[in-house]
Image: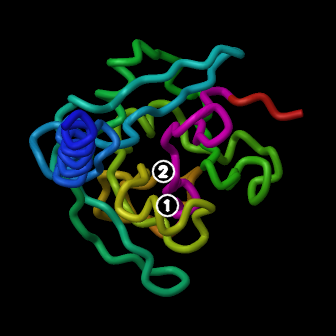
Amino acid sequence: MKKFLNFALFVSLIAFYACDDGSENTNNTNEYTFMDGNTADCEFGTVSFLMGGQTVRVDINGLDVEVLSGADKIGAENVEIVTRRGVRFSAILDKAEITAPDDAPFNAIGRDGYDPLRTRLEGDTSKLPTFAFVRDNAYIYVGYPGDKDPLYPEMEGKTLMVDFDLEDDAEVPEYLGSALSAIGMFRWKMVEYINETTAGLFEINPEVE
């Protein structure tokens, strides 16, 4: 009888875990609404800022989601205006209590290592967007980085990406090229923090050796 009861208990436990829908498991991605709701609810919702040698991390989850303009690249020099659901950088910076001079250069390094400042711009910080431009125009949305993502396909539809709430070339400052297509290098992908070794990083007034 004792052996039978132990076996029955074992079967019951197996059935329980097999039927468990994961409602208590915070890693169950089916629980997340990402940017579909009124507020952000992302599986990987933390971003990191580096300024003056100090790193500040902030969780964007819970911040208001808005419908914003964006741009998809069409050919070499053309873009198509689209709409996206995202969280404005102004709200993220406010939550992180980050301030900087309006003209401070702003860079980002994706968790795939993409870094326009130290590659395409050859370390010239004057060619970066300013803190004010990013604060007033940029936002974070959830997107699909594609198979260049080191974590493809795990992060498809989960990764945090950057775009700008702009619709016309005239809204792009002259120092950034006066065109929506010219700021494509600053539409950073894969900017979320996953762990200490896999994370994007926003740099405010970056130092270049």
The range drawn in magenta is: 182-205
Farthest residue to the left: give it.
38
In the picture, measured across the screen, residue 112 lies left or right of residue 46, that is right
Q: Which residue is mark 2?
A: 173
Q: Are marks 2 and 1 in contact (CB under 8 Å)?
A: yes
Q: Which residue is mark 1?
A: 178
Q: Quadrant of the N terminus?
A: top left
| Magenta residue check for 4 | no
Tell me the quarter of the picture where residue 158 sits.
Answer: bottom left
Where is residue 64? Give x, y as percent: 17, 34
| Magenta residue check for 185 | yes
Q: Is residue 99 above or below residue 81?
A: above
Type of the residue with mark 1 = Ser
Where is residue 74? Give x, y as percent: 43, 83
Under circle 1, the secondary element is loop
Q: Is residue 36 above or below residue 136?
A: below
Q: Can residue 35 be spotted in the picture?
A: no
Type of the residue with mark 2 = Pro
Q: Residue at x 51, y 80 (%)?
A: 77
